[in-house]
Image (cartoon, coloured by chain):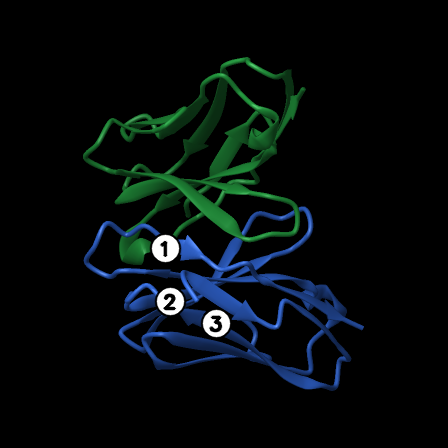
Chain colours: A green, B blue
Amino acid sequence: KQEVTQIPAALSVPEGENLVLNCSFTDSAIYNLQWFRQDPGKGLTSLLLIQSSQREQTSGRLNASLDKSSGRSTLYIAASQPGDSATYLCAPGGYGNKLVFGAGTILRVKS
Amino acid sequence: ETGVTQTPRHLVMGMTNKKSLKCEQHLGHNAMYWYKQSAKKPLELMFVYNFKEQTENNSVPSRFSPECPNSSHLFLHLHTLQPEDSALYLCASSQEGGSGEQFFGPGTRLTVL
């Protein structure tokens, strides 16, 4: 059974810092991995999708890497802004595109 | 309307009520999902439909009954729920055979009294 761990559980930083959020998973037999953000009481917004054959994906100030063999992914946020404050969720996708979610990292960026 | 929509956004029901949650996707996808997000627990997959056929039931109690009449609509019928079923219910869709990227709706906040 896939288990996903996200570290740190919470993070509070001043505006402008570069951040690294970590995700580890126990079953490396994945097809892809998605990073999402979730604002309080809201749905999920897809940030990046990395296919199992890829090493990284970039979108604006976000960069996600994937090391499938070691069961790790990182989300790098450059020059953080208060609007980046949210919960960030990592979800590896297995057979049948079934996502398994971590508990998330709660990020607060202070202005 | 664009993306994935869900109605109602909020629902309060008693344990003896019967209600339904609705999800509609406007992305031309052919796979749809129900997820449950309880307080202090990670998101859990409940059901998966591909081309209107159920392909996954993640050991969900029978008081939750999904229905997928076509590739654009997904329902979750609720009956005789328990207070511990109170949660945020999220719907998602993706393109089977595509990148696999899932897009989520805003969710229905359910409270069972």
Residue A98: which numbered mark, if any?
1
Q: Which residue is mark 2?
A: B32
Mark 2 vs mark 3: in front: 3
- For mark 1, name the chain: A
Amino acid carrying label 2: it is Met
Query: Given the current orientation, which residue lies at the most extreme right position?
Result: B113
Q: Report x, y in % for residue A67.
A: 30, 26
Residue A13, by quadrant, is top right
- Helix, strand, or loop for circle 3? strand
3D distance between C-alphas at marks 2 and 3:
9 Å
A29 or A33: nearer the viewer: A33
Q: Residues within 10 Å of mark 2 (few under 14, many from 20)?
A: many
- For mark 3, name the chain: B
Residue B47, by quadrant, is bottom left
- Residue drawn at (49%, 60%), measured in percent from left and top? B105
Image side of residue A73 versus residue A108, left or right = left
- For mark 2, name the chain: B
Dot 2 or dot 3, earlier in sequence:
3
Q: Report x, y in % for residue B110.
A: 68, 67
Is B70 drawn above or below residue A17 in the view shown?
Answer: below
Q: Which residue is mark 3?
A: B23
Q: Marks 1 and 3: in contact by CB < 8 Å?
A: no
- Helix, strand, or loop for circle 2? strand
Q: Report x, y in % for residue B18.
A: 66, 86
Amino acid carrying label 1: it is Lys
Q: Residues within 10 Å of mark 3 (few under 14, many from 20)?
A: many
